């Protein structure tokens, strides 16, 4: 029984000490390298959280963005979002012709709280 | 000529397993079939329980000589990977490549919950000693409380290899039963108000943190406890592969082909250690009872520490995430999420619970190192 108590006491102590040490190291490390909330807020204010506007006039797709692969992805997302809102009817043959970014007009705290709500739902 | 024919048939029958087999072997074949049923139909941790149960069946085929102890056979050579402690660290390599430690890095206090949940290991050690098990046997049984199959197999193969079969079967069966074992204990130890706590969203974690984390953990834990180095080192190597982003091919291999192959070898050879004379022993009943106690104490330890953190932080930590400190990833985190949602349908505890859940993997590896360093 003495050995059992000894192993229990030593074992729990060592496990806690090791993980407390790890906890402290991670905490100190995060202070140096973590993505700061203030930096995020500043960046989002600068970038503005641009809105995307759809224009569907003919069957061609055009984009002013230089990165062609990310444009394709964005177009796919926009098409899916529009079709979802229209109920996936077969006759709703939506093709995104072009898109352009417009500046964000709502306050930065509105934008941040929308992002937080979305993240919470995910 | 006819009498020779009859004698030949008679000899064949007399040398067949139908006559030479004993009732213990037939009972073990029945147990193997039952475990296969649990794995296939009830889906109790089938990835390990199915090869383990079939290995058990092969080992108990009368006169077939297919157990892990029968020299010269395939399973004997496969078993050497278990005996020499090779397979569990390789499984940990795959687990590390599949694990995201982001929730843990974002909330390092989760490590304390992972530590508290290891109470199950040490409380079971006391219980096993009281029941008359030798220290090395008690250590092997108690590691079931870590809720980590490879760790349990690694420790048992070093301390009490003759108990490998029943301990592996108990460990994986109880891991599958986590959604049944944990909720009553969680509800018993917490109030509704505590279960309703909504936790603050986790901060984003940078790539630099995720890359440096595995290196830091390996150095720190191995310096503290060199016996934990094989498990923790391989876990963190797999994680470094994943987070570095520069070795996608070997990350995919570690996550898929490697872990699948080792799982097959490990499962079959561990199951094939459970011969009738090892398994049908009163000690097996003790293992089954103590295994349940181990999981229960581990859950209770994590929840109680979660309550301490709830009080210490003024109600910011939901104590339910403490139960995820048992390292049954991600099942225990899902249980915390489910019980939390029963109390507050709008509450999403899953990512918060993943922190203690993955911390439990590290905690159980450290606890295994402690047991090996004291009892080996």
Image (cartoon, rainbow, N blue to C red):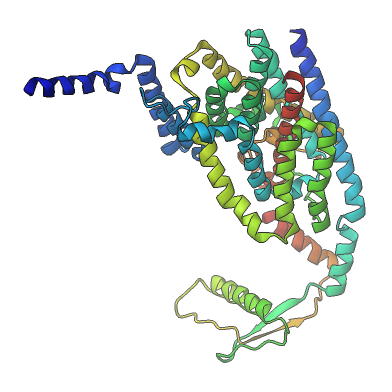
Q: Where is residue A53 in the image (x, y as percent from the top left)?
A: 69, 81
Viewer-proximal residue, B348 or A27? A27
Q: In which quarter of the image is residue B41?
A: top left
Viewer-proximal residue, B327 or B26? B26
Viewer-proximal residue, B102 or B163? B163
Q: Position of residue B365 (x, y in %)?
A: 72, 33
Q: In the rendered image, is residue B185 in sight?
A: yes
Q: Is residue B6 above or below residue B270?
A: above
> How many numbered marks does the figure carry?
0
Q: Quadrant of residue B129?
A: top right
Q: In which quarter of the image is the C terminus of chain B?
A: top right
Residue at position x 58%, y 75% from top?
A: A82
Q: In the rendered image, is residue B49 in sight?
A: no
Q: In this view, does B206 lie above or below A84?
A: above
Q: In this view, does B158 lie above or below B347?
A: above
Q: Quadrant of the N terminus of chain B?
A: top left
Q: In which quarter of the image is residue B236?
A: top right
Question: Residue lying farthest left?
Answer: B2
- A40 lies left or right of B181: right
- B90 lies left or right of A89: right
Residue at position x 78%, y 47% from top?
A: B214
Q: Position of residue A105 (x, y in %)?
A: 81, 76
Residue at position x 89%, y 40% from top?
A: A24
Q: Position of residue B110 (x, y in %)?
A: 78, 39
Residue at position x 56%, y 42% from top?
A: B262
- B223 lies left or right of B179: right
Viewer-proximal residue, B100 or A51? B100
């Amino acid at each position: 029984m003495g050995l059992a108590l000894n192993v229990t006491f030593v074992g729990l102590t060592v496990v806690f000490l090791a993980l407390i040490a790890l906890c402290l190291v991670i905490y100190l490390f995060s202070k140096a390298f973590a993505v700061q909330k203030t930096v995020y807020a500043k960046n989002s204010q600068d970038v503005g959280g641009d809105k995307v506007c759809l224009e569907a006039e003919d069957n061609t797709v055009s984009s002013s963005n230089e990165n062609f692969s990310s444009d394709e992805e964005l177009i796919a997302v926009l098409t899916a979002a529009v079709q979802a809102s229209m109920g996936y009817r077969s006759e709703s043959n939506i093709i995104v012709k072009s898109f352009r970014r417009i500046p964000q007009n709502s306050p930065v705290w509105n934008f941040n709280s929308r992002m937080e709500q979305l993240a919470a739902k995910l | 000529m006819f009498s020779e024919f009859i004698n030949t048939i008679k000899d064949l029958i007399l040398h067949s397993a139908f006559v030479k087999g004993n009732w213990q072997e037939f009972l073990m074949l029945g147990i193997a079939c039952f475990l296969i049923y649990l794995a296939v139909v009830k889906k109790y941790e089938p990835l390990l329980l199915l090869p383990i149960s079939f290995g058990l069946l092969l080992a108990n085929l009368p006169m077939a000589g297919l157990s892990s102890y029968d020299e010269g056979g395939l399973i004997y050579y496969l078993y050497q990977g278990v005996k020499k402690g090779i397979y569990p660290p390789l499984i940990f390599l795959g687990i590390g490549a599949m694990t995201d430690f982001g929730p843990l890095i974002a909330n390092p206090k989760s490590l304390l919950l992972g530590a508290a949940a290891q109470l199950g290991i040490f409380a079971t050690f006391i219980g096993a000693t009281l029941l008359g098990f030798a220290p090395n046997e008690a250590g092997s049984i108690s590691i079931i409380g870590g809720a980590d199959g490879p760790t349990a197999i690694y420790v048992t193969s070093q301390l009490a290899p003759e108990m490998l079969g029943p301990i592996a079967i108990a460990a994986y069966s109880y891991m599958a039963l986590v959604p049944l074992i944990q909720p009553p204990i969680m509800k018993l130890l917490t109030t509704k108000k505590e279960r309703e706590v909504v936790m603050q969203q986790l901060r984003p974690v940078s790539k630099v943190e995720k890359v440096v984390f595995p290196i830091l953990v390996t150095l720190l834990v191995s310096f503290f406890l060199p016996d934990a180095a094989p498990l923790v080192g391989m876990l963190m190597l797999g994680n470094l592969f994943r987070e570095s982003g520069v070795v996608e091919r070997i990350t995919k291999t570690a996550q898929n082909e490697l872990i699948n192959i080792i799982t097959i070898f490990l499962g079959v050879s561990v199951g094939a250690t459970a011969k009738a004379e090892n398994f049908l022993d009163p000690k097996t009943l003790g293992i089954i009872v103590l295994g349940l106690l181990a999981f229960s104490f581990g859950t209770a330890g994590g929840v109680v520490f979660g309550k301490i953190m709830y009080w210490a932080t003024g109600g910011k930590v939901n104590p339910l995430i403490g139960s995820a400190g048992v390292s049954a990833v991600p099942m225990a985190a899902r249980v915390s999420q489910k019980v939390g949602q029963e109390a507050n349908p709008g509450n999403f505890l899953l990512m918060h619970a993943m922190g203690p859940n993955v911390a439990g993997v590290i905690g159980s590896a450290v606890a295994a190192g402690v047991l090996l360093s004291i009892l080996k």
